[in-house]
Amino acid sequence: MTLAGKEKKYLRGLGHALNPTVLIGKNGLTEAVLAQIDGELEAHELIKIKFIDYIDEKNEIADEIVSALKCECCGSIGHTFLFFRQNANPEKRKITL
């Protein structure tokens, strides 16, 4: 799934009012954190992730999240990244592109 520029811009607009739902701290990206991100994407489709530690490696960790969970990174501001994954069930989709 790849998003066009207009779609990413739309999602960034929706994500502006969101608070970070996942914080990545001193333990980095673990299996538990990946499971939490996966659950949040399943429930909300659009989430924010904030990096508290691992500031220098945040782009690499974001790429790992994208490849592991089959989601898209819509943008980042500072230490906060916005991720989107459309729900597989069309009836449970909250965001239409």
Image (cartoon, rainbow, N blue to C red):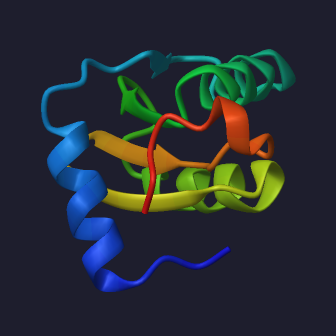
Disc tally is 0
* Residue 66: x %, y % from top left: 66, 58
Q: Is residue 73 above or below residue 42?
A: below
Residue at image location 80% in from the left, 15% down from the top: 32
Residue at image location 67% in from the left, 49% down from the top: 65
Q: Residue furthest bottom?
A: 4
Quarter occupied by the N terminus: bottom right
Q: Is residue 82 above or below residue 71?
A: above
Quarter occupied by the C terminus: bottom left
Which quadrant of the view contains residue 11?
bottom left
Q: Is residue 1 above or below residue 27?
A: below
Q: In the image, 60: left or right of 74?
A: right
Q: In the image, 71: left or right of 80?
A: right
Which quadrant of the view contains residue 70?
bottom right
Nearest to the observer: residue 34 or residue 41 = 41
Residue at image location 78% in from the left, 26% down from the top: 30
* Residue 48: x %, y % from top left: 38, 32
Q: Visible in this render: residue 78?
A: no
Q: Residue furthest front?
A: 91
Q: Visible in this render: residue 46?
A: yes
Q: In the image, 69: left or right of 66?
A: right
Residue at image location 70% in from the left, 28% down from the top: 42
